[in-house]
Amino acid sequence: HGIEAEVLLAYYRRASACRKKKCTLPTVTCADISETAVVKAASILSSKRMPIKVMPVAALPRDSFDLVFCNFVLFKRLSSSEYAKFVKFLLSLGEMIVVVSYVTGGWHYSALRHEESVEAFLHSSDAPPMLLFLLANVFFAVHWRSGKLSGATMNFTKLQPLFKVRHEEICGKASAFAPSGVIEATPCNE
């Protein structure tokens, strides 16, 4: 329904591009393989006047994104080669991707076994650079194109401001880009 795109826009609006004292918000694109989901998300987001583009996955332009965030779409059992094809496709869209899904047994509806797909791919010789984080019942797999970034040269302290979002930024009622779904998705009642 576009909720994840709204949350990403809220969290990453600090990533604005600023040139000559003029800043622009990041462009967020919401995509799905289901035409029904695309139509529904487009309707919901346009009614809220959100600056989010909606399109089918097949229409996504190649080499057009700084970050591709793929949330909870892997539910079937995958081999490492199937996961490799998935990663290769996503990296054709942008220079860095983040794949988030459930670890083995993390959700009873998911048949994905991350150790057979993601971890096996991590140890393969043809895998692009990757960082894997396991957190409770989910994993975050960060992949990037070879030569663009490296774990050794990445300055994570410079990236921290993107992830440290003040409570008021997300929950503040005056925010023009505070999407309605964020209130339910974050601890705004605290």
Image (cartoon, grey):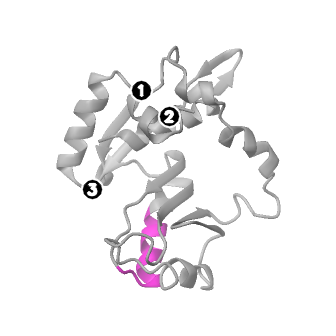
Amino acid type for the residue under numbered disc 3:
Ile
Predominant SS of the magenta segment:
helix
Question: Which residue lies under the disc numbered 2?
Answer: 9
Measure the alpha-carbon separation of dots 1 and 3. 21 Å
From this view, report whether residue 117 is shown above or below residue 68.
Answer: below
Q: Is residue 134 left or right of residue 68?
A: right
Mark 1 or 2: the one toward you: 2
Who's the residue at 36% across and 34% down the image?
53
x, y percent for residue 19: 68, 22
Q: Quick check: marks 1 and 2 in contact, CB under 8 Å?
A: yes
Instruction: Determine whether the residue tagged by mark 2 lies in a helix, strand or loop.
Output: helix
Earlier sequence position, callout 1 versus callout 3: 3
Magenta residues? 77-89
Q: Is residue 87 magenta?
A: yes
**Numbered tag placed on residue 33 in the rendering:** 3
Circle 1: is it few (<14), some (14-19), or many (20+) Cα within 10 Å?
Answer: some
Q: Quick check: marks 3 and 2 in contact, CB under 8 Å?
A: no
Instruction: Determine whether the residue tagged by mark 3 lies in a helix, strand or loop.
Output: loop
Question: Which residue lies under the disc numbered 1?
Answer: 51
x, y percent for residue 94: 52, 53
Toward which corner of the image does residue 119 lie, by quadrant?
bottom right
**Numbered tag placed on residue 4 in the rendering:** none
Mark 3 or 2: the one toward you: 2
Who's the residue at 69% across and 39% down the image?
164
Earlier sequence position, callout 3 versus callout 2: 2
